[in-house]
Amino acid sequence: MDDKPSLLDQLRIDRSPTPGSASAGTGRWWIIGIGVAVLLAAASFIWLHAFGREAIPVHTVVAKALAPGAVGGSGGGSLLDASGYVVALREATVSAKAIYKVNDVLVQEGQSVTQGQVIARLDDTNTRAALEQSRAQVKQLEAALAAAKLAEVDARPIFLRNQTQLGEGLISPEVFDSSKSSYDAAQTAALVAAGNLAVAKASVEINQRYEDDTVIKAPFDGVVTVKNAQPGEIVSPQFSGGGGIAKIVDMDSLEVDVDVSENFINRVRPKQAATITLNAYPDWQIPAEVIAVIPTADRSKATVKVRIAFKQKDARIVPEMGARVSFLDEAPQAHAGAASPAPVVMVPAEAVQANGDAGTVFIVSGDVVEHRAVRIGARDGNTQTILSGLQPGAILAIGDFSKLSDGARVRIVQ
């Protein structure tokens, strides 16, 4: 019986602390606590950023495909749009060369004229009188020249006879000298008379030109666009205010001049296809072609001037009309079996952050947004063309772009 308690004592677990065992247990619990805290912090961070962060309010728009042929119908999209005006390469303000009174104006605004056609007549009272005076002087000097030549002819035989007689000793040297002087004087008088007649004829030519200047003619074929003078008015280049008598424009020389930002001038080149849309006819797209890129920039506007030619003439096109030019992308059509070119889409300009040829958009997927880089084309008012990087039907966010980033939660508002 005494052995039974001793056996039970041997089987009992000894739970008395041993040296160092308390500090080891405490360290393990600290490690476990720190790990749990880290896990809780990570979970809280993920929850706050994924679920707990306040959603950013945005509006949404849908990217729309550009209709085939909507811009120029050339198979390529518009690389760039620019606004300008219709101008005439050849136009003239016809005026007087000096101060004249207008007698008659023979044209009206809108009238077509041909080169050399008389469009106005000026008062020629003074010029005609001067012309008649110079003509009378010519007749007078012609008579004086005839008399001088006759005197020369009469003096010549006397001079020659006296020269012979002097050689034969029949006359004195004094008599010969007298005849020679008379003959020399007659020759000189004839030369002077001829010179005076030449001056008078030149005066007739000058006065004839003054008379011709009183008849105003069209310098080339064209249309009268402005009529500034009326009969009885005084006109001159100095006092007409630049208006002259009439303004004539050659309608076959019309073109469009636009100013292109120097940031996008690399998209334009000579002979490039384009379309012109007049503000007066917004649904009429006129085939066009780049004539030239003027090799200088306007530092005040940071633009470069570009000239565009109409490929199609029409009476509706008139100078000073506002126009919009679309410079076309002439990328070739995809061949059979080849991959189709990237679709061109149109989006509101406020949905794109533009930076030169590139831009960025935020595509809405559920309640988050995705950052997307795109290649931008022309901008027409509030509409931006996207040449690549975006598919039609994509939903884009419009809002405070400084708050948007990949994966950001958004709340769509109407």
Image (cartoon, rainbow, N blue to C red):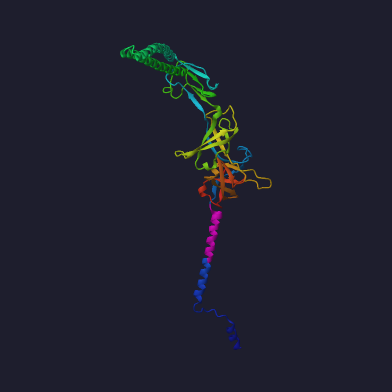
Tell me, yes or no, if residue 380 can be seen here. no
Residue situated furthest front in the rendering: 168
Q: What quarter of the picture does the N terminus occupy?
A: bottom right
| Occupied quadrant, residue 205 | top left
| Residue at 50% over, 75% down | 22
Percent across and percent down for residue 409 are: 56, 51
Who is closer to the viewer here, 394 or 360?
360
Tell me the magenta residue range: 35-53
Left or right relative to 4: residue 188? left
Asked if residue 198 is positioned above or below residue 365 in the image, the reply reads: above
Q: Position of residue 211 (x, y in %)?
A: 45, 17
Q: Nearer the viewer, residue 73 or 412?
A: 73
* Residue placed most toward the observer, 412 or 373: 373
Residue 278 in the image: state x and y as whole percent. 56, 32
Q: Is residue 79 left or right of residue 236?
A: right
Q: How many marks?
A: 0
State yes or no: residue 284 in magenta.
Answer: no
* 49 is within the stretch colored magenta: yes
The secondary structure making up most of the magenta span is: helix
Q: Is residue 250 visible?
A: yes
Q: Quadrant of the C terminus?
A: top right
Q: Is residue 343 above or below residue 15?
A: above
Name the residue furthest bottom: 2
Residue 303 % position (x, y): 48, 39
- Foreground: 48 or 396? 396
- Which residue shows up at 67% across the image and 45% down it? 335
